[in-house]
Amino acid sequence: MKSSLIIHLEEYMGAKMPEIDSVTQETKNASDGMAGRLAQGAMAAGLVILYKYSRSSDGAEYLLNTKPAELEMSRLLNNKQDELITQLSKFAGSTSLQAGTMILAVTREAMEFTQQEIKNNKTANALQSYFGNQRQSILGHLPPELGLGDIMKDDTLDDRTNKMEGPISSLAHAIEDVFSSSGARKS
């Protein structure tokens, strides 16, 4: 089931998120045109970036206390934004300028929506829980061709078991969600 964040981004971008077959790792509904592929790739990458950055207490605080229009991709990607922009432009067949502009716009819009979603409980823990609860849905839409696992040094992003669905996988993901709802270590 798609999260309200994914539904919002699809409406905002006028494109559907890609769906990844967990067995073949192929994108089921890849857009044929450059603009559609750029939107699909930017939505998937933007959500992963926000999810990953929200895992630490400092990251969650930054996302929570920074106006979405002021988010800096260099900070969110630990100065690897050029790698991501290159990958996204290859994936979409776009220019680097188009890819960079699109990923920034999508990330900022996603964070604007997220801040509205948690407005009654604007805490770092609430933000971490929000993105932790979105993890499965986000990873199920991440095209492996983007290579975000390599860029972000996280093999679990491209791991096909994270994209699986079904009764056993759902149970395993539910258990995983309990343990990943907050990325911050408790002292």
Image (tube, rainbow, N blue to C red):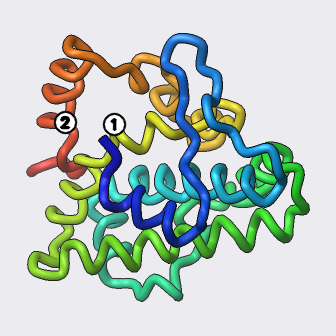
- Mark 2: which amino acid? Asp
| SS under mark 2 | helix
Q: Left or right: where does residue 23 sit relative to residue 100?
A: left
Give coordinates of residue 3: x percent, y percent. 31, 52
CA–CA distance between discs 1 and 2? 8 Å
Give coordinates of residue 133: x percent, y percent. 23, 47
CB under 8 Å between discs 1 and 2: yes
Q: From what the image shows, is residue 32 above or below residue 3?
A: above
At 65% from the left and 42% from the top, the residue drawn is 151
Q: Where, quadrant-wise, is the N terminus in this rendering?
A: top left
Q: From what the image shows, is residue 122 above or below residue 125?
A: below
Which residue matches tag 2? 177
Mark number, residue 6:
none
Q: Which comes before the other along the chain, label 1 or label 2?
A: 1
How many marks the image carries: the answer is 2
Give coordinates of residue 131: x percent, y percent. 29, 54
At 44% from the left and 59% from the top, the residue drawn is 50
Q: From what the image shows, is residue 94 above or below residue 122?
A: above
At 50% from the left and 55% from the top, the residue drawn is 49
- Mark 1: which amino acid? Gln
Q: Left or right: where does residue 115 sit relative to residue 158?
A: left
Mark number, residue 136:
1
